[in-house]
Image: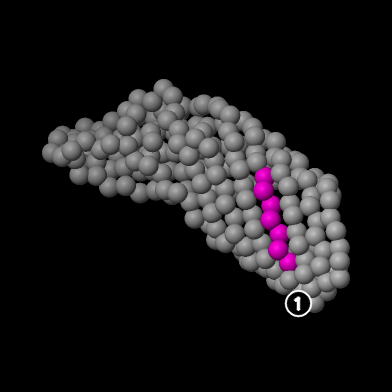
Amino acid sequence: MVGARCISICCNPPRFGLIPPGVAASLTEWNRFWGGDVLISKAACGGKSKGCCWEVDCLAGFEYLDLGERLDTAATTAAATGIDGFSTRNQFYGLELGGRAEVVMDRWLVNGTATCGLGEVHQSLQLDAAAGGGGAAAFASTHVPDDGFAVVPHVMLDAGFNVTRNIRLYAGYDFLYWNREAARPGDQVANTVPTSLERSDFWAHGSTSGRRFGLDNDRA
């Protein structure tokens, strides 16, 4: 089966550390989140009747996730101007376990997938700082690595319609939660000389839509 899939994702913004009173500051940020998995499915149970069939599969495999974010702050006081850049990266490698259920009624179908990733997350912070005032300037750079254990549940719901036996249109919703083992740049602002990483949670959700072409669309 081949097809095309469009995904629109939103995620929770990073928290910001405290900025001292009396300091004029500006913030800019960006993030990048992507990942993939390789799963093996095993039919657990299923049934079929006139115009309707259902199936439940067990899933197991490997999951990789990559979350990169950057926060730049520019602060100005009467004496000096400082620019700080906080770049964080979280790389998750782990075992993925879960299940998938699908119900097909005539041309309509609904399926849901729930998985949970368990594994190692490698984290790093790159802090770049520059300050200037009175004709002088200074620059410093710090790199802080860290590792931890993370749990990442993921839920996907899809509803589709078989236009023909070989063409399926579908739309759905995805939700992913990264437990409190994600290093995010806003949490590091208060650490002027960080030796360890502050962590918080991360979640992302979005809508999906697409079409599939194949010979197995019609199970009913």
| 219 or 79, nearer to the observer | 219
Q: Main secondary structure of the magenta part?
A: strand
What residue is rendered at 77% in x and 69% in y? 105
Q: Residue lying at the far top in this picture: please name it.
A: 195
| 62 or 145, nearer to the observer | 62
The colour scheme is: one colour
Determine crowd level at label 1: few under 14, some 14-19, many 20+ residues with C-alpha closer than 10 A: some
Q: Position of residue 128 (x, y in %)?
A: 38, 34
Q: Residue lying at the far front in this picture: please name it.
A: 49
Q: Residue lying at the far bottom in this picture: please name it.
A: 163
**Residue range highlighted in magenta:** 109-115
What residue is rendered at 55% in x and 58% in y? 206
Q: Position of residue 118 (x, y in %)?
A: 65, 34
Q: Is residue 172 found left or right of 71 in the rendered image?
A: right
Instruction: Please say whether residue 111 is one of the residues in the magenta stretch.
Output: yes
Q: Quadrant of residue 54?
A: bottom right
Residue wearing tag 1: 163
Q: Position of residue 161 (x, y in %)?
A: 72, 72
Q: Is residue 68 found left or right of 189 in the rendered image?
A: right
The three-letter code of the residue at mark 1 reads Val
Quarter holding the C terminus? Answer: bottom right
Q: Is residue 30 above or below residue 187?
A: below
For numbered disc 1, what is the local secondary structure?
Answer: strand
